[in-house]
Amino acid sequence: MLYENMQAMYRRGEEDAMKAGVILGARKGKADMLIELLKDEFGEVNNAARYLIYELDEAELRDCFKRLKLAQSVDEVVGHLF
C-alpha cells in the first residue's frame, strides 16, 4: 500500500512538472515572438529590453502585444515596465 501511494505521488509530481514546463515553454515562445516582431518593426532590441521581456508574465506579454499595434518604438511597448 505504501509503495502504491508513493508511486502515485511520484506520478502526480511528474505530471505537475510537465505542466509547469509546458507553461514556461509557451511563455518563452510568446516572448520570442514579441522580440521578433519588435525587431521587424523597429530594428535591433537591446539586451535590457530582451531580459525584461523574458521576465514578463502572461498578462504583461499580452499587454505588450496590444501596445505594439500603435507603438512608434520599442520603448513604447516595454518601457512602461522598466
Image (cartoon, grey):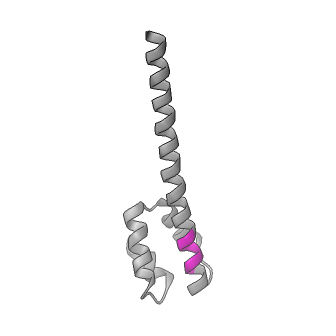
Say if 23 sits above or below 38 in the image. Answer: above
Q: Is residue 45 above or below residue 72?
A: above
Main secondary structure type of the part rendered in magenta: helix
Magenta region: 33-38
Reply above or below: 39 against 17.
Answer: below
Identify which residue is drawn at 49% across, 86% down. Answer: 73
Confirm whether residue 40 shows in the render: yes
Q: Decide which of 48, 9 is in the foreground and name it.
A: 9
Extreme residue toward the top, this view = 1
Q: Quadrant of residue 82?
A: bottom left
On the image, the x and y values in percent for residue 26 come to 51, 58
Which residue is at 62% across, 80% downward? 44
Q: What is the number of callouts on the image?
A: 0
In percent of the image, x 56 and y 78: which residue is there? 37
Task: Please indicate whether residue 43 sits to the left or right of residue 68 in the image.
Answer: right
Q: Quadrant of residue 78?
A: bottom left
Task: Give left or right: position of 46 versus 77.
Answer: right
Q: Is residue 70 magenta?
A: no
Where's residue 5, x and y in %? 43, 17
User: Does residue 82 appear in this view?
Assistant: no
Image coordinates for residue 70, horizontal then vertical, percent? 42, 88
Q: Position of residue 1 (x, y in %)?
A: 43, 9
Q: Residue at x 48, y 44 (%)?
A: 19
